[in-house]
Amino acid sequence: MASFIDKVKIFVKGGDGGNGCVAFRREKFIPKGGPAGGDGGKGGSVILVADKNIHTLLDFKYKRHYKAERGRHGEGNKRTGKSGEDLIIKVPVGTVVKDAETGEILGDLTREGEKLVVAKGGRGGRGNAAFATPTRRAPDFAEPGEPGEERWIELELKLIADVGLVGFPNAGKSTFLSRISAARPEIADYPFTTLRPILGVTEVDGFSFVVADIPGLIEGAHKGRGLGHEFLRHVERTKLLLHLIDLSDQTRDFKEAFEKINKELELYSPKLAKKPQIVVGTKIDALSDRSVIDEAKKYFESRGYPFFAVSAVTGEGMKELLRYVAEKVKEIRENG
């Protein structure tokens, strides 16, 4: 399984500006031939660009320092030095950029091709020709170039999946995702199997959408307990939530499971809690008494939530659910 890196810190530096030049022409009757030193070139800037073909921040784990090209120094005959090339760094769509020292948000790259300058190149120094005046005809000095900006920045990836899977640990999210897509999340019989969000692409009748399996919640997640903030940061931008509840769990009533997860969402972000939810009763293959399915369906639909009962192991109920989800995602996309 490929690693999913969702938060990194990198150092960026704009290129230094080139120095201005001190030079003189050789002309008869002109003091020292006349000043002819050109300006230094501007340093290149470091620019982040959102690219939909990049899905993780993994590359930044191995390379942490990025520096744009410096400007060339000015030359004689009033020739301006060549400006340094900008350094373009591609990042995933959905990357939030912060100043690592102050925590200030510098930008939020949510659209393909969106750009953000994170370290400006330094201005080139003026050559001595720029300082000539009627009373100072032969200046013998020039400006040095300005240094480029430099800073440590934090890149944080917020997933822009269409559908987020929420529910208690072991609600069956990883098995569900592996069933509906080519994603291969780690699956085991213990809490917090999913330590990092995992993306899967699901296709229904030629229409595809992205599903994110997100770390499980526990009570107190909104305060940062367990994997709370890891989880919550990634569901903020999903368009639709699939709330998975293990109907075979003898230790927790399905109503209690539903209310506790939604309470955590509400405490973290009221806006998040208002996202459309579809309730999915899972692991129905493990039920000895299937009357709980009808009970759950009646309870959730009376509260306005669409309800589906499925088994990711046998496939029961999965086609109906996915068709419904696909239609909902289409509606949400069309309505912006």
Image (tube, grey):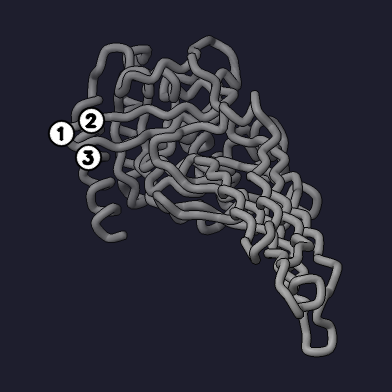
Amino acid of disc 1:
Gly
The quadrant holding residue 135 is bottom right
* Residue receiving disc 1: 206
Q: Amino acid at mark 3?
A: Tyr
Q: Residues within 10 Å of mark 2 (few under 14, many from 20)?
A: some
- Is residue 317 at least partly visible in the picture? yes
What residue is shown at x 57% (from left), y 48% (from top)? 85
Q: CA distance from mark 2 to mark 3?
A: 12 Å
In the rendered image, which residue does mark 2 sit on?
203
Measured along the vertical axis of the image, is residue 191 above or below residue 241?
above
Q: Residues within 10 Å of mark 3 (few under 14, many from 20)?
A: some
Left or right: 84 as drawn, with respect to 101 = left
Q: Position of residue 235 (x, y in %)?
A: 50, 43
Q: Residue at x 86, y 68 (%)?
A: 140
Amino acid type of the residue that numbered disc 2 sits on in the rendered structure: Glu
Q: Can you identify the residue that label 3 sits on?
A: 324
User: Regarding mark 1 in the picture, which secondary structure is present there?
Assistant: loop
Are the residues tagged 2 and 1 within 8 Å (C-beta)? yes
